[in-house]
Amino acid sequence: MPVINYHNVIHALRRKPQALWSSIYRDSLFPRTEYAEAWKVLQRDLTRRDACRRMVDLLFIAHDQACEAELAHLLADDLGASRAPDPDLLMLRLSPKQTALPRDVAVAHPSLDSFDALLGACA
């Protein structure tokens, strides 16, 4: 069976998430084993519609945020704690922490004469 990269079909799946349920390529769409395990838990615990929506949302987060490995670790944590993965909660855990930027940064501008000296040495 060919391997289909989920990046190539994620936007179509977002429009029709229930297509995931009957896709013959579904199992090859999952980039890591944690995603496949999450799918099994979602199938077991949720309705067909909700399971498809959540799994597509998880794949979209991995695609959109370029955090496939980090999300896989968070999925493993949820699965280890016997929790069905929740994309909204996982997105909060993935969000970057707000850090304060320095207010004043001193920038020393070099003298233009130093560039003339540099160019003169190269000539």
Image (cartoon, rainbow, N blue to C red):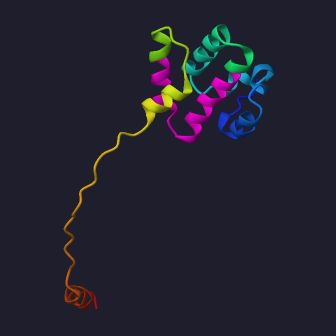
Would you place residue 48 above or below residue 19 in this image?
above
Residue 69 location, x and y as percent? 48, 30
Give 121 or 116, whichever is nearer the viewer: 116
Residue drawn 56% across and 24% down?
32
Give 86 or 26, whichever is nearer the viewer: 86
Is 101 placed left or right of 44 in the picture?
left
Residue drawn 23% across and 87% down?
112
Is 80 one of the magenta-colored residues?
no
Q: Quadrant of the C terminus?
A: bottom left
Q: Quadrant of the N terminus?
A: top right
Would you place residue 11 above or below residue 71 in this image?
below
Residue drawn 75% across and 36% down?
15
Is 79 placed left or right of 103 in the picture?
right
Is 61 one of the magenta-colored residues?
yes
Magenta residues, start to end: 52-76
Give 69 or 52, whichever is nearer the viewer: 52
Would you place residue 43 above or below residue 121 in this image?
above
Report the number of numbered marks: 0
Residue drawn 79% across and 22% down?
24
Question: Toward which corner of the image does residue 46 lie, by quadrant?
Answer: top right
Residue 81 location, x and y as percent? 45, 9
Give 25 or 81, whichever is nearer the viewer: 81
Which secondary structure type mostly characterizes the magenta part of the structure?
helix
